[in-house]
Image (cartoon, grey):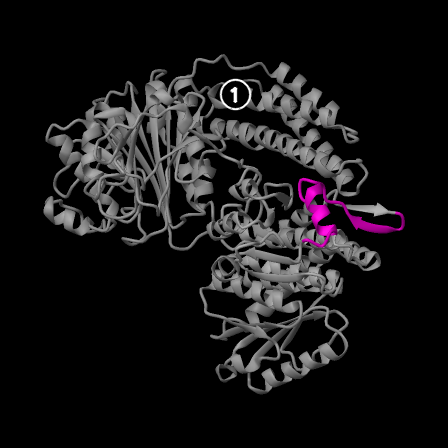
Amino acid sequence: MCGIIGVVRRRSTRVPPEAGPLVAGLDIALARIDGWRGSLDDLQVAAAAVELVDAALRGVPGVRTLLTDRLGAVAIEHRVDAITDSLATAEAALDAGEAGVSGADLEAVNAVLLRIKDATWAVRNDRLRNARAVGDLAGTDAGIAAIEAFTSVQVSLSALDRLEVRGRDSAGLHLLVRDHALDFTDPAVVGLLSRRAADPLFEDGAARTPDGLLSLVYKAAAEIGELGDNTRHLRSAIRDDELLHLALSNDAAEVIVLGHTRWASVGIISEPNAHPLNSEELGRADGPYVVGALNGDVDNYADLTVLESLSVPAEITTDAKVIPMLVSHHLGAGTAATESFRATVATLEGSVAIGASAAAAPDQLFLALRGSGQALYVGLAEDAFVIASEPYGLVEETSTYLRLDGETPADASRAGATRGQIVVVDTARAGTVDGLERLAYDGTRLPVVEADLQHAQITTRDIDRGSSPHFLLKEISEALASFRKTLRGKIVEDGARLRVALGPDTLPDAFRSRLAAGEITRVAIIGQGTAAVAGRSLAAILRVAVDGRVLVEPMLATELSGFGLRDDMRDTLVIAISQSGTTTDTNRTVDVARDRGAFVVAIVNRRNSDLVDKSDGVLFTSDGRDVEMSVASTKAFYAQIAAGALLALAVADGLGALDPAWAHELLQSLRELPDAMRDVIERRGGLADVVQRHVLSRRYWAVVGNGANAIAANEIRIKLSELCYKAIACDVTEDKKHIDLSSEPLIIVCAAGLVGSNADDVGKEVAIFRAHRAAPIVIANDATRYPAALETLTVRAVHPELDFVLATVVGHLFGY
């Protein structure tokens, strides 16, 4: 798992904006938000005003404004902080039901609140932060070339920080500088170059001067470390590089940047193996100069090394080294740069994404993608192309991108047609469609048009790790807010009682009529993985609420499509749960169920996702865009629990089966649950002590639970397996014959909320576990004691249908 980043920039011609009008625009937004009482128009005016400021401050012109007008920058930062505070007050009013917004109006308000949050975040955390970073890199009195170049460097370093989700053990950044006006015979320049040019392995700080250009590389490699370590090293080295600053003192100088973050698969973790790598061979450094970076694996690199007689230094053992060497060989034979790159990548076997630059074409960057295991995106920003292997690597600068297609051949009708695409980006037309040349691997030209461009649905706000050391901990902590946002505006007071209020966008009037008429007799709740586990909670609440009036079936989506379909499903409500809205198995099942007449309601996190388009009604979790960066999804699970409870009560109410008093108690408990979740998170230190005392000494693990706690057990089992790469048993607490007690396992017993005879029964099972030398760690109420437990982790009692949620929070933190 690796990440590529590249930046190609042309000289900006836009006049830097004046800070005064920008501050005035933010004042307009603040006036509309401060003291907000439910007006959608006020929010729309505010959103448009802040978005205009963000647009004005993008690119090099914005950086120049913020660097030269320090007082204006301070005023802008002050205004966006005030807007952020006013937004928090407005959202609190929404959550408390004081803004008078519900139903379809609520979704519109949520959508425009997202726009304001995105824009204010971008001004503070993208524009202001980047300008400060560029100033730190460039130093005082930097000329236009230095500001342009260091803006590209900052964009690259910022993207590498985000792409470290894909790789961390090494990182590198290569700068190819042209029109620098350095005199390589000047003794002072020779002194700066001599040691760095003598490094044969192209390690950190190495320098080359091919064809009068300046090639500089900065690298970091360490098996052990924290996120951000690598880019901190690169940033420091670049900031302090006297040779680079001297090269950029000429106002005509321009830079192409190619960077990489790596998770080693072929070759040890070392600076010589860190990408980008150059084309130099053992005993031969005079060929055409090329630098390249690779995601994926070149499966035939050993064969190519022999067939092409490549002389690779023994210290370099990564498969990526063959790429610049082969391109150099083609260039040396007189082949043009683009064709040399195409001929090289066409010989590589495996799923790969590649970036390369060449001294023969110093104003171009070459990209290739083959197979489905990797990705490359070319972002079209103001006067720049930003290339990244994930959209979150480029959204700081632009949401518009071209995605390379590594799977579709140019001629799909021809058997054995070569898959893969090549894109060459050109400095002179950077940021425009005209600056993109696209080819198939066989050389077929594939012109890029505006219709090929896509638009990201995320911003850097969604993917910021903040002060958290890891994304997983950040997202567990954010689950409280996700839960509250899911409830926002959907629980209303009706006299002395609370009730659910879901609009026709979730349950259309025509469907409510069918519910009331008894035409719906079956509810199938589907999802895959964690979403399917969340579906079991919805099913449990719905079964209690409807008291047998309809058949309630929670199942994997693949089980419904494989075994649960009927020719006529007009009596069936399908509730499809998905975090992304793009889960293939879930979406395919929705298609076939709707074809048979089923009514589909989706619980989904992403607006504009495929599942939304396929469904008759939608209930968004959180605010409709709550991105999770951690592979182990957590906060989506809690939001799905909240949405499922709301939907279960609304369906039961539509059937005429809901007990209002019971519903009131459940809704009250739903509102209280985030505070109880916070209590658990705040006790993380004690939980960590328990983990350290017992986990590492136990090779085998199991997770058990009964009743609603079986839902927690299943979810915890999934996360522990994802995080720890262990096969973990999971069963009902009493079904101990399916847990190998002879292995003396660590057993997490989910028993939150159990009282009376149920708690007594679990206590007996825990004693049996202990008698077999297992290590039972019980998650239970503060008031319930399990004397045989090795450890008891306590949680607050909230509601019998919801207490399992707190056990899950403990389990997620346990895994972390």
* Whole-percent x, y for residue 631 in the image: 49, 53
Q: Which residues are magenta?
A: 495-519
User: Which amino acid does the dot numbered 1 rest on?
Assistant: Gly
Q: How many marks are shown on the rendered structure?
A: 1
Q: Secondary structure at mark 1?
A: helix
Q: Residue at x 45, y 34 (%)?
A: 394
* Whole-percent x, y for residue 264 in the image: 33, 52
Q: Residue furthest bottom?
A: 771
* Whole-percent x, y for residue 225 in the image: 44, 52
Name the image quarter holding residue 541. bottom right
User: Can residue 501 be found in the magenta stretch?
Assistant: yes
- The image shows residue 789, relative to residue 503, as above or below, that is below
* Whole-percent x, y for residue 700 in the image: 48, 75
In which quadrant is the C terminus drawn?
bottom right
Q: Residue at x 62, y 20 (%)?
A: 71
Name the image quarter holding residue 682. bottom right
351 and 602: which is toward the camera: 602
For this view, does 623 lie left or right of residue 295? Answer: right
State the residue position of label 1.
62
